[in-house]
Amino acid sequence: MKLYKDREKCVSEIKKRLNSDDIIYFDFNAEKTYFTAIYAESLSDKTMLGKQVIEPLQKTASFSSINDVMKSVTLPETDTLNTFADCIDKIIAGDAVILINGFDKAVSVSTKKPSARAVTEPPTASILKGPREGFVENSQTNMSLIRQRLKTPDLKYEKLTVGKQSKTTVGLVYISSIANPKLVKTLRDKINKICVDGIIDSSYIIKCISDRKTSMFKQVGSTEKPDIFSAKLLEGRVGIIVDGSPIALTAPFIFLEDFQSSEDYYTNTYKANFARILRISAVVLSILLPAFFVAAQLFHLQFIPLAFLLTIVGSIKGIPLSPSVEMFVTLLIFEILNEASIRMPRYVGIAMSVVGALVLGETAVNAGMVSTPTIMIIALSGICFYVAPDLNETLSVLRLMFLTIAGFMGGYGIVLLGAGLITYLCDFNSFGTPYLSPYAPINFGDMQDGFIMNFFAEQKKRPSFLQPKNKIRKGEL
Amino acid sequence: MSKISSRQLSFIIAVLFSVVKFYVLPAHVSAFSHEAGYLALIVSFAIDFLLLLICLYIVKNQPNSSVYETSVKLFGKTFTKIVFIIYAVYFLIKAFIPILEQKNTISLTFYESQPTLLIFMPYFVVGFYIILKGVNAFSRSVELISLLWAVGLLITLSLSIPAGEYASLLPIIQPVKKVLLGTVNSFIWFGDPLAILFLAEFLIDKKGLYKKAIIGYVVGAVATIVLVMVFYAVFQGIAERQYYAPIKMSKYSITLSNIGRLDYFGSLMFSLVSVYSMTLPMLLATVCINKVINLKNNYIVPLIVTLCELALVFFFQNEIFQNIKFVQTYILPFMLVACYLLPLILFFGVIVSKRKHRIKEVYDV
């Protein structure tokens, strides 16, 4: 519906449509021209509106066109609006809308009040060496953090709006001279196709754009750190920033990324490689250790060295539960403790750990409910989880699956589940990129930043599985 | 879309063609050729190498993208369809012995006191799933599990090499009859390069095909021959009764008494690789049937193939050695014909069509 020339009729129409107490209607005039400024009290900066919009307008003698109004305002982000729907969209987005008597158009000025918290170190990605800045909830601040690192005109930011009710700003970020245009188009199309009520966090976007919506494996990368985000853009990935979320997304995502840490690139290559091998071993151990222990106890006692076997026999004597049930119950208790300690306030969480680890564990062993090796194995498996924190959710499900199958079928069950899992992952693509790249399919060139990392000076090409426009990363060093 | 690269084909040749020969074959060939077992295998590998070269020549030079189309062009549609159904049966039989071997290995080494049929049956669910996922996922998986194959081999050989008496492999020159006896009786474990013909239609590029396939073949052959040599050196006179070699040959290592049966992990790794080696013939049988009946539903053919194989294993599971004997006595001629006749006919067909094409080109000019 188009705006009327009569300002008061427009105001009453907007009031009818936007009936809320936090919407302010402020009338003012400049000699013979009458205005109404409409804005959301909670979202707009009133000082900015007064000093940079109302004051200059009041000082102007006459307005022959809508352009004169826009020129008088001393804010850069202005727009001409023709319909009531546009006006309402702008008001609820935090802009101020100026209605002018005698014009069937309105002017919007960006007076958004930033309500961002300070840039701090993200709690999910602490490091010893390297940048400590983390993304915040404000997408403009996040974009500025990226621009500080990538001062290239090729860095593009495409603003998209998603969510029927929330109308969330979603930014598609990429380096046009590097990123594959097909990938950019695919992501743009996928985001534009999203039809939901609201996008409250970037995780909503992940769920909407993932190819396999029921999979437990991550298909889109996520990070809270601008340095990681920038490095991924430089590799040829495309980023997504969601207003209101401190977690930025990157696509395509490969399985290997969960084993890479930003610190690997800031420390000695030898140390980084050692850390990566440790992470992989720990992840394998965390999934398979409880399963193999149960399989060995139930089906293959010959797996266990004699001395260790005697220790186990001594400790499981009198335990009323079967090894698989014992392990399953202990694991369940561990998961409950884990869940509770994350949700609890920090000071209660410490007490919770003490109760869980010392009191519960110790008492359960003393009471003869569970054996010491079981507690030890669950604890080791639990610790191993946190070397790849982003894999945490997937690993706990996988651990339970392997444990269950080991309890029923023993070692061969683990083998069969392993084969099924390998096939599943090999069949998996993230936006056209094989999930297990560069190992399946093998690409020796891309292994420069694989489980074993090559020296920085030797990493001359961008990963080919991302099909970047520009394949060369650096010249001779 | 299902795709496979020359490198992935090379991994399939190296890993899957060799792992099926690790279990019963070492003992079986020792029964016929004794210390000349490895020589018998060298002869078998040499014969298979010729088959490999023929298959590679056909794949590289055939005018069409698939053997099916080439065969239709040379011999007509009806004949080709019959041939492909015969090959589906051939591949089902080809999968039968490795599956039985694996089942027996599992039961004798890991589940001495449990009924293994129920424990082994879920393999068919996984096998069905692998077939369903297609050649693309299959070939990528093989690349990944090749690492397990290498680690498994390393564990098995490093634990068993110190226990071997290598003088028992001498003399190198052995009577021809003794060597050939082993070769003839080990035929059911050979003839694998035929798979290349049926995988050819999925090849995305034929660049470096000869080189990569031959490297893969040599790696697999060397691994098998070394394993058989070490196996005989460990067991010597009693080698013919030591079936399921990987689990038997390394058990005498002193290391195991300190760290537990590490060799079982090697065996488990081979078992994981074997899941794919057992599935390959079933996958090829599916490819053959799909060519003939071309159903829209992806599930039906893999399900039929898996159920047929399951039925075969279910009804003939108990006596693996009688089954091997039966296959060798009654089915071997069929397998020989299937294995060599079609590749040879296609080979000559491709040569003739190539020559005709060249003559036509000369006259056109």
Image (cartoon, grey):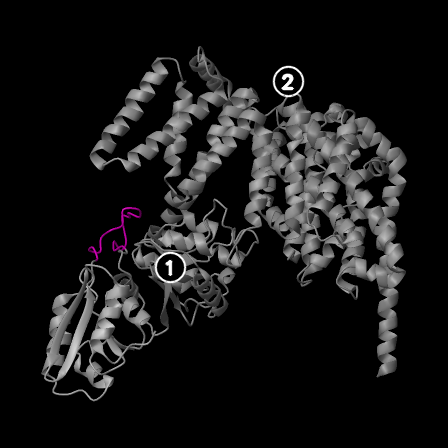
Can you tell which quarter of the image residue A64 is in? bottom left
Q: Amino acid at mark 1?
A: Gly
Q: Which residue is mark 1?
A: A163
Can you tell which quarter of the image residue B90 is in? top right
Q: Position of residue A157 (x, y in %)?
A: 35, 68
Q: Position of residue A146 (x, y in %)?
A: 30, 64
The residue stretch that appears in magenta? A116-134
- Residue drawn at the location 70% of the way across and 39% of the way down: B278
* B244, B139: nearer the viewer: B139
Q: Position of residue A444 (x, y in %)?
A: 53, 56
Residue A285's place in the image compared with A151, above or below, is above
- Residue drawn at the location 84% of the way across and 59% of the way down: B71
- Checking the image for residue A277, the label placed there is none
Q: Nearer the viewer, mark 2 or mark 1?
A: 1
* B114, A260: nearer the viewer: B114
Residue A73's place in the image compared with B6, above or below, is below
